[in-house]
Every structure is written in structure tokens, then in C-alpha cells.
Amino acid sequence: MNMTKSDIVDIISASTGISKVETEAVVKGFLDTVIDAMKDGKSIELRGFGSFKVVKRAQRVARNPKTNEEVIVPEQHVPVLKISKDFKKAVSEAVPA
């Protein structure tokens, strides 16, 4: 079961009493702020949730599975989210095995 941005807006709107339009603007603003900060190479730390940062992946050699031909994957910068210990623990305790 997947949750979409629209689902998040609905839940926040219902629990806070803020209109869906205003809630959607806040959620969009948050996401845009995170993306813009990471584009500038900044890290973001949300205590109890996790840390967003940009890491540099070195150039590497991979294989095309269809042709088995070697392909060079260029160096790139990718966004990474490291989940906090509290978040991991909460999920681990709540989700049945």
C-alpha cells in the first residue's frame, strides 16, 4: 500500500483543521525547500526523522544485462536520506514481522 502526497495532505488537513489548499501549499513549500537546499549542496537534519545530504558517487564500470557489454557510469551527485534511530525503532516495533 502506497501513500501519495495527496494522502499526506488529506491526513494533515484533517488532523490540524487547516484547509487542504493551505496544507498542500505548506507540504509543497517544504518539499521545494528541501530540494533547493540539496541543489545547493546543503545537508538537512530533521531530528527524530533523518538527515538528507548529497553524496558523490564515483565513476564505475557496469554491465548492460541484455548485451553483457561493459558501460561506464559517470561520476554523479545523488540525494541520500539516512533515517534516524528513533524512526527505525518506531517502525520496527509497529510493523508486524
Image (cartoon, rainbow, N blue to C red):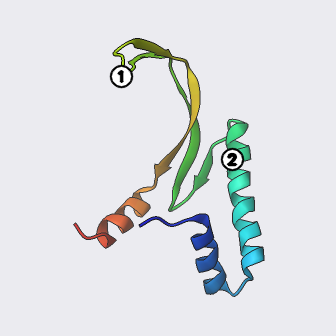
Q: Residues within 10 Å of mark 1 (few under 14, many from 20)?
A: few
Of tags 2 and 1, the one toward the viewer is 1
Q: Quadrant of residue 53?
A: top right
Around disc 2, counting alpha carbons within 10 Å, would you say few (fewer than 14), some (14 to 19), or many (20 or more)? Answer: some
Left or right side of 18 for 45: left
Seen at 58% across and 25% down, the residue is 76
Give the residue type that dot 2 points to: Ile
Q: Earlier in the sequence, mark 2 or mark 1?
A: 2
Where 91 falls versus 62 (above or below)? below
Q: Amino acid at mark 1?
A: Lys
Q: Residue at x 59, y 52 (%)?
A: 45
Q: Residue at x 41, y 67 (%)?
A: 1
Q: Position of residue 46 (x, y in %)?
A: 58, 57
Q: CA distance from mark 2 to mark 1?
A: 34 Å
x, y (%) of residue 85? 40, 57
Q: Secondary structure at mark 2?
A: helix
Q: Name above or below for residue 62 compared with residue 89.
A: above
Relative vertical location of residue 18 with respect to residue 23 in this rendering, above or below: below
Image position of 31 (left or right of 84) = right
* Residue under pointer 1: 66
- For the C terminus, give its image quadrant: bottom left
Under circle 1, the secondary element is loop
Asked whether 56 or 11 is in front, the reply is 11
78 relative to 67 in the view: left or right: right
Where residue 78 appears, as percent x and y from the top left, is 57, 34
Residue under numbered circle 2 = 35
Residue 93's quadrant in the figure?
Answer: bottom left
Residues at circles 2 and 1 in contact by the CB criterion of under 8 Å? no
Q: Position of residue 43 (x, y in %)?
A: 63, 43
- Residue that appears at 58% across and 79% down: 11
Which mark, by number, is residue 20?
Answer: none
